[in-house]
Image (tube, rainbow, N blue to C red):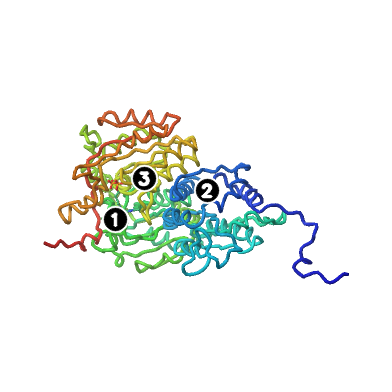
């Protein structure tokens, strides 16, 4: 009896060869250049792990999903490719949240692939499902910080979601994308040619030549212009173009935290970082500029001294021209004379070309003034570079680190003295070698991100400069570095507490309640170097200032990961700018 077959069956030619989706997905990831995935297992993702284990892709198994996300973030920053995270559902995905959000707020390309409850359990509230408002709702947790969240309901949609995720994570302003996959779909069949579409090659937006002329005209005729570089200049690898523009028109360059490295540290036009933890010469030149051309920055609060016109930017009367990959950043915090949506490298190349050979106003003794300003500020701490004090001065730690790490080595910070001090005082000559969490400023970033950095550049030095607070948030990084054979160095600045916040509380309230590490009222210290040794890694307790340099040299030439623990005075980082939280605190009786 021949009756018409159901249409769904009729549409599927019986001859189509099929394979299990997780194998096809893995081969697709190989094809688009994924080298490494950071993640942590769970019953929802072992089908994909089985396929990954048989592929060329490395899987770095971390012991906490936040570590995986930060490591993928570090890999993305150091390699320029999207970081890839694999996470179990529910608690795995919530653990990864902070790392993914940190990447989002620093515009880092990332693809997160998460397992989820089996699709056929819809409505039954299965094990580990997040379902209090809606069934299979876990992907919603990622909505506020992902560029896009894909929930894959049919295996046929998996190839499209993955292709879109890699495209979107890198296009325009980069950021994380989540692909949430019910676990049964990893084990479902797909036609062997299902993963056809590659992410498109992209031509990023350039700056129109007439706009470039207009900006160069304005810079050339301005009396006190400033170029202001953000992290977009570093991530677009646009520093040579920036230097060419600055030199052609003799314009000084200030930068954000993430823009550090935009010019060589000894460049005579470099003003340094702006804002609360900036430098006086940078804040002064920005505040008194008649024109600022800002590139690849969101003019964020910390670098703008809470946008208070008395400290860093006074716009107006300063005129602002702003070039960024994201149109939403333009005009948000300051009135803007001209906004342009463009890739930082293409824009700066167009500006440098338009500026070449162009006459400009005399800048008088600008270079001397910058040199004087930088020297005067450095005089506040440069004598500490050689201080033999124990516990060490933080400046001595920076000086030893700079001496030990080659110019192309990576300095990865966390938050605390390490980030603020390096941003303000540490010379960086090779762009992209300073890696730091800026937007979310997550404690715990540095110890994990350094793993991904080293994975991206195994032949270059990678040191995480971190506080003891940040390091102890997730010391499982040592075991992960051992397993993944990543000889990174963690230099732990130990002040037995959350020092930056302890100092802030002490300044306003006269004590540091809740900020120091204590046991029975006494300072409580953890031997992190011993923890490293317990993991089979190297652990060094630095007992004097003179011992730090040799300890760093040994660590950088070792083939095992090393924790160097050094006792440090909890001295505050200078704050030449302003942060208006300091006006909020009130002390009662
Ligand atoms: C996850 C997270 N929690 C809290 C903070 C607030 N915070 C900023 S700096 C800091 C102290 C960091 O302590 P440590 O790593 O020891 O460095 P130190 O300040 O002593 O140099 C804290 C808790 C944060 N940025 N991130």
Can residue 352 be spotted in the picture? Answer: yes
Which disc is residue 413 wearing? 3
In terms of depth relative to the viewer, which is nearer, 489 or 512?
A: 512
Name which of mark 1 and mark 3 comes first in the sequence.
Answer: 1
Q: Is residue 336 above or below residue 64?
A: below
Crowdedness near tag 3: few (<14), some (14–19) or many (≥20) residues, C-alpha within 10 Å = many
Q: Marks 1 and 2, Cα distance to the nearest angstrom? A: 42 Å
Residue 560 % position (x, y): 44, 31
Secondary element at image label 2: loop
In front of the other: label 1 or label 2? 2
- Label 3 vs 2, first from the N-terminus: 2
Q: Look at 55% across and 66% down and name the residue there.
A: 124
Tell me where residue 307 appears, x and y as whole percent: 29, 63
| Gap between marks 1 and 3 measured at Cα | 19 Å
Q: At 23% across and 44% down in the image, what residue appears?
A: 519
- Where is mark 1, residue-wise? 275
Q: Estimate the x, y position of residue 11 in percent, counting from the top left.
A: 77, 66
Q: Earlier in the sequence, mark 1 or mark 2?
A: 2
| Residue 41: mark | 2
Between marks 1 and 3 in the image, the one whose residue lies nearer the viewer: 3
Q: Quadrant of the N terminus?
A: bottom right
Q: Residue 28 appears at what percent x and percent y?
A: 64, 51
Residue 212 seen in the current view: no
Question: Closer to the observer: label 3 or label 2?
Answer: 2
Look at 41% across and 32% down and name the residue there. Answer: 537
Determine the image quadrant of residue 408: top left
**Element class at badge 1:** loop
Q: Residue furthest right?
A: 1
Camera-nearest residue between 287 and 385: 385
What's the mark number on residue 520? none
Which is nearer the eye, 197 or 303? 197
């Amino acid at each position: 009896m021949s009756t018409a077959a159901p249409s769904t069956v009729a549409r599927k030619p019986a001859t189509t060869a099929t394979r299990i989706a997780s194998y096809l997905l893995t081969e697709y990831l190989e094809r688009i250049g994924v080298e490494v995935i950071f993640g942590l297992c769970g019953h929802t993702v072992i089908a994909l792990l089985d396929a990954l284990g048989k592929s060329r892709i490395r899987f770095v198994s971390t012991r906490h999903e936040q570590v995986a996300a930060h490591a993928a973030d570090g890999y993305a920053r150091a390699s320029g490719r999207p970081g890839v995270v694999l996470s179990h559902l529910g608690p795995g995905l919530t653990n990864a949240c902070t790392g993914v959000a940190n990447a989002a707020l620093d515009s880092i390309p990332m693809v997160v692939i998460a397992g989820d409850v089996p699709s056929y359990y819809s409505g039954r509230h299965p094990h580990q499902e997040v379902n209090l408002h809606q069934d299979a709702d876990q992907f919603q947790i990622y909505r506020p910080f992902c560029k896009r969240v894909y929930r894959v309901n049919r295996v046929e949609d998996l190839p499209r979601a993955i292709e879109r995720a890699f495209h979107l994570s890198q296009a325009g302003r980069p950021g994380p994308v989540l692909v949430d996959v019910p676990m049964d779909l990893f084990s479902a069949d797909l036609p062997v040619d299902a993963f056809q579409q590659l992410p498109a090659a992209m031509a990023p937006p350039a700056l129109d030549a007439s706009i470039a002329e207009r900006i160069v005209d304005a810079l050339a005729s301005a009396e006190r212009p400033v170029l202001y570089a953000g992290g977009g200049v570093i991530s677009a690898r646009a520093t040579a173009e920036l230097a060419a523009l600055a030199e052609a028109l003799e314009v000084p360059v200030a930068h954000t935290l993430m823009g550090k490295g935009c010019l060589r540290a000894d460049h005579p036009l470099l003003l340094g970082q702006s804002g609360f933890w900036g430098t006086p010469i940078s804040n002064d030149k920005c505040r008194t500029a008649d024109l600022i051309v800002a590139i690849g920055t969101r003019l964020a609060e910390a670098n703008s001294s809470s946008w208070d016109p008395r400290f860093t930017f006074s716009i107006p009367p300063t005129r602002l021209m702003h070039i960024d990959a994201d149109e939403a950043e333009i005009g948000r915090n300051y009135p803007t004379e001209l906004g342009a949506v463009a890739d930082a490298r293409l824009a700066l190349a167009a500006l440098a070309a338009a500026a070449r050979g162009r006459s400009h106003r005399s800048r008088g003794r600008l270079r001397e003034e910058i040199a004087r300003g930088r020297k005067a500020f450095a005089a506040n701490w440069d004598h500490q570079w050689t201080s033999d004090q124990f516990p060490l001065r933080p400046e001595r730690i920076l000086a030893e680190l700079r001496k030990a790490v080659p110019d192309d080595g990576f300095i990865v910070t966390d938050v605390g003295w390490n980030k603020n001090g390096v941003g303000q005082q540490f010379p960086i000559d090779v762009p992209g070698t300073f890696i730091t969490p800026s937007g979310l400023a997550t404690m715990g970033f540095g110890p994990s991100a350094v793993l991904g950095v080293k994975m991206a550049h195994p032949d270059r030095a990678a040191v995480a400069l971190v506080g003891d607070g940040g390091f102890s948030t997730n010391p499982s990084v040592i075991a992960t570095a051992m397993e993944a054979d990543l000889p990174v160095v963690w230099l732990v600045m130990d002040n037995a507490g959350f020092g930056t916040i302890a100092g802030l509380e002490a300044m306003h309230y006269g004590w540091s309640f809740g900020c120091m590490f204590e046991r029975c009222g006494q300072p409580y210290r953890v031997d992190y170097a011993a923890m490293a040794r317990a993991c089979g890694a190297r652990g060094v307790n630095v007992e004097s200032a003179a011992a730090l340099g040799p300890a760093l040299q040994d660590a950088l030439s070792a083939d095992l990961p090393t924790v160097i623990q050094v006792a440090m005075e909890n001295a505050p980082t200078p704050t030449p700018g302003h942060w208006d939280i300091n006006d909020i605190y009130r002390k009662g009786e």
